[in-house]
Image: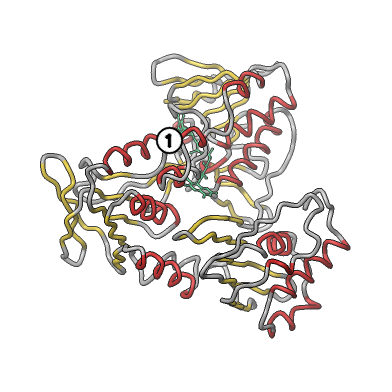
Amino acid sequence: MLRYVIIGTGVAGMAAAETIRRQDTVSPITLVGDEPHGFYSRPGLAYLLTGEIMERQLFPVGKDHVAALKLRLVQNRVVEIRADAHQLEMKDGSTLTYDRLLIATGAGAVRANVPGRDLEGVVKFDSLDDLRHILKLVRRTRSAVVIGGGITSLELVEGLLKRGVKVHYFLRGDRYWENVLDETESHIIEHTLKDEGVQLHFRTELAEISGKSGRVTGVQTADGRALPCEMVAVAIGVRPRLELAQGAGLKTDRGILVDEHLQTSHPHIYAAGDAAQVFDPATGKSLLSSLWGPARDMGRVAGQNLAGGASAYRKEQPFNVTRLAGLTTTIIGPVGTGGADQDLLDITHGDSEAWSLLPERGLGSVIAAQAGFDVNHLRLLVGPQTLVGAVLMGDQTLSQPLHHLITRSVDISPSRERLLQATSLAPLIIDCWDCWRKNHADPIAI
Ligand SMILES: Cc1cc2nc3c(=O)[nH]c(=O)nc-3n(C[C@H](O)[C@H](O)[C@H](O)COP(=O)(O)OP(=O)(O)OC[C@H]3O[C@@H](n4cnc5c(N)ncnc54)[C@H](O)[C@@H]3O)c2cc1C
């Protein structure tokens, strides 16, 4: 019998606990977390902010699930890992002994490093408590400044807008999310935001947050402009939580360094999720991730290995389905300016591709399909033999075929020239997908 302890009750920690229990039905599994609300969907917070879902819908599992798995939940903050003694110390002074430990402490929002950042009205968007705090402040907020160039900042913009707040959106560069989207894609988002009344401020940096009686009253920009507001929402990135690992003498870089089996530099300690920086044998690099799916997958692999397995975590091609300014957007593979190499050709199509082109829907498949958008946009990155990446905005008809073709590196060379010349991509993509499915696909995997 082994004593398993997991620090962190996020998706990585929960997935690990479930996996351990499947393999070891008797040993005690303890999850220690300082999150007062336990396990919930953090991606779902954006939908709660816009008012589209109720708070209870954030919780994918109930107490009965935890009880059925015989998990022990401890709400506390771990302040120290004593690796040699196999012991944890908690904030309240209590201790916990482990035989196998998983660190799944996630990543926390980076704070703005400017004067005034502690004023009431400066908010982040990292947890359910942050969201509750925003909803409380929103009642007396007429105008807000949102800072940051990625998905979370846009979720804040849209959520605040839905709550009736006038939004100023500060972007450092010339356009929205320029390291991932191309110019057209950025402009699609920017136009939608402008139509909705968002004031976009390009090449604008926050220099100072001003306040009165401890509360935000406005901001100063680096180029000397002043803007009144009652809220400053900051989403400028996340940083893995490393303090525990560093204190325990584990090797760290930007995250907690783990090998492909998710084992840290200490043999009985593993790390998974946003906190882990995983060695990828294919590239020889150690990579961070800050997405739900990879965190869950890492949790599963770590769980297997904590219970005595020897599974390797293989980082999948990036795959993210999100909503940008109301537009469902799927991003597959390395589509950003940093990701494309010179051999890749970029094809962009702006017209709607027909949903009816999909052959024999079925085989137990779930096809993400959405129609009726004003804007439909598809960008494909075509490598010498395979499709390397894609961005789909609006109509999602091709999202599953492209996901399969890209993540399974399907050889599209017989259709490559036709793809590069095509005025309508959908029939060709569907043909390639159909052909691959007939020859190779395992229907269950689809
Ligand atoms: C608003 C928002 C929207 C998002 N949207 C998306 C999306 O659309 N798609 C997507 O793929 N991803 C999205 N993400 C990211 C995704 O939620 C994370 O990648 C994922 O939750 C990481 O899981 P994790 O288990 O590694 O860490 P976390 O979920 O961060 O869990 C770690 C837990 O450990 C706890 N902890 C940390 N230190 C200690 C300690 N010392 N003692 C005890 N407990 C500790 C933390 O409080 C936390 O509860 C979003 C995140 C946010 C905040």
Q: Nearer the viewer, residue 265 or 233?
A: 233
Q: In the drawing, does residue 351 fall left or right of residue 140? A: right
Q: Residue at x 42, y 25 (%)?
A: 79
Q: Nearer the viewer, residue 398 or 2?
A: 398
Q: Position of residue 163 (x, y in %)?
A: 33, 48
Three-letter amino acid code at the position of disc 1: Glu
How is the protein colored in the picture?
secondary structure
- Residue 334 visible in rendering: no
Report the residue that reaches farthest toward the left.
213
Q: In the drawing, does residue 337 fall left or right of residue 418? A: left
Residue topped by disc 1: 243
Q: Residue at x 30, y 69 (%)?
A: 203
Report the residue that reaches farthest toward the right.
439
Mark 1 Cβ inside 8 Å of ligand 1 = yes
Q: Nearer the viewer, residue 433 or 160?
A: 160
Q: Position of residue 274 (x, y in %)?
A: 52, 43
Q: Position of residue 429 (x, y in %)?
A: 73, 71
- Residue 354 visible in rendering: yes
User: In which quadrant will I find the N terminus?
Assistant: top right
Q: Tell me the quarter of the picture where residue 146 sits.
A: bottom left
Q: Position of residue 409 (x, y in %)?
A: 74, 64
How many tags in the picture? 1
Q: In the drawing, does residue 29 fall left or right of residue 85? A: right
Pointer 1 local density, CA inside 10 Å: few below 14, some 14–19, many at least 20? some
Q: Tell me the quarter of the picture where residue 29 sits.
A: top right
